[in-house]
Image (cartoon, rainbow, N blue to C red):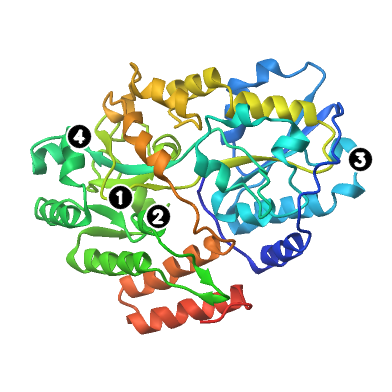
Amino acid sequence: MKKLMVAGVAALAVAGLFMSCGGNGGNNAKSSAGKVLNVYCWNEEFQSRFNDYYAAKLPADIKVNWVITPNQGNAYQQRLDEALLNQDNVPADEKVDLFLVEADYALKYVDTDYTLDVKSAVGLTDADLANQYKYTKDIMTDSNGVLKGVSWQACPGGFIYRRSYAKEVLGTDDPTEVGNILSNWTKFDEVAAKMKAAGYFMLSGYDDAFRVFSDNVTSPWVVDGKINIDPSIEQWIEQTKTYTDLGYNNKASLWSAESTQGMMKDGKVFGYFAPAWFIDFCMPHDDGSAFGDWAFCKGPQGFSWGGTWICAAKGSDNIALIKDIMYTLTCDEATMTTLAENAGDFANNEKAMTTVANGSYKNEFLGGQNHMAFFLDSAKSIDKSNMSAYDQGMAEKIQAAMKEYFDGNVDLDTAWNNFYTAIAELYPNLSR
């Protein structure tokens, strides 16, 4: 899941070392039975999924050691990198067995020897993986066509909006009708003006729509060693500046207290662009929240945001166990169906999600809506062909540089110059 990610030069230096390893190298891994399963991750999300949907199958003599390091300051990647680089020098029970990665930096680990081939080394088959959404496999496929990780979740996104504000301003809170009213950016802008007139903010702040635009680029951030700015990114900048100047957003930054406050019962923000995990892990569910006053629709453009992938580490002595964990939590249709119904995840299994979308599932936070149906087409259409190893750094630096512009502290030219300066420090191998 994408939460707080901060790139660092030290991590990039390690990434360079990783990238130099190349190839798969996992075919020599042999199944053996270690007694300690070391799992590296950055929060308790996977731990909760593991405990709820796999722990009952865990052999009694196996101890799971959770090595959880928060993302802040790039601490998670740094600790993971150190452990992987030292993998050959520690006892078997101290080696990394499983580790998790996010989409923004997955390629840092995919094209290395540190991740095992999910099929030839771990043992999953094409039939096991058949119902997983294609883009979730594309993200974790290396330059040689080798699959290096799997996920229990797909993360198509949409627009989560306040029902009461929709009914007041638009005359309806029905997700299908609201979705039609917001079906392109021109209509979205028109509704933003109406929300402003009624005393509401269309969006919380500067970053809210970024993932929609960045996920719909038609070219990568880097082309032939040069920084490339896709027209979709320029559209985000233009729209966000307009929304800021016209008072259509609350000038909040993502993950800020101001952004969260907009989600509360007395908050004045109409909606947030986000996937299913945002509802459960980022939106308040306490007494002061707007629980039940939310609904979900597709919005102007389909997009995806985040996702967490499970990787098997080269050197693990728990390959058979890893295979069973990966199968149960990412391939088994029954588990995927139950996970979606109980946890609200959009599970990474097309058959399971079709069943849930057409069934009796209701999300009480969304006023009893079965929002899964809105995700089905988006999940199949997600295209990650323009991903690159630079995505995380580029996204963070451009949002930081443009915030100064949105705030009115610098003009647009200065903001661009600040962005290019920051990128030159982060990625000195790139040119303008």
Return the disc, 1 or 3, that comes first in the chain's sequence: 3
- Which mark identifies residue 301? 1
| Residue at 34% over, 75% down | 405
- Seen at 45% across and 21% down, the residue is 342
The spot of residue 74 in percent (x, y) is 63, 57
Q: CA distance from mark 1 to mark 4?
A: 15 Å
Tell me how far mark 2 sits from mark 3, CA to CA: 42 Å
Q: Amino acid at mark 4?
A: Thr
Callout 4: few (<14), some (14-19), or many (20+) C-alpha neighbours within 10 Å? some
Q: Is residue 430 above or below residue 264?
A: below
Q: Nearer the viewer, mark 4 or mark 2?
A: 4
* Residue beneath disc 4: 176
How far apart marks 1 and 3 lie (CA) works out to: 50 Å
Does the residue at mark 2 contact the one at mark 3 (Cβ under 8 Å)?
no
Q: Which residue is mark 3?
A: 91
Task: Kindly indicate whether the residue at mark 2 contacts the one at mark 4 (C-beta within 8 angstroms).
Answer: no
Amino acid type at image mark 2: Arg
Mark 4 falls on what kind of element? Answer: helix
The amino acid type found where label 1 is placed reads Gln
Does any portion of residue 307 appear in the rendered image? no
- Choose the circle earlier in sequence order: 4 or 3: 3
Which is in the foreground here, disc 1 or disc 3?
Answer: 1
At x 72%, y 50%, the residue is: 80
Query: Mark 2 against mark 3, which lies toward the viewer?
Result: 2
Query: Which residue in the structure is indicated by mark 2?
Result: 211
- Residue 264 appears left or right of 414: left
Q: Residues within 10 Å of mark 1 (few under 14, many from 20)?
A: some
Residue 252 spot, x, y in % from top left: 33, 58
What is the C-alpha distance between the residues marked 4 and 2?
22 Å
Disc 3 marks a residue whose amino acid type is: Pro
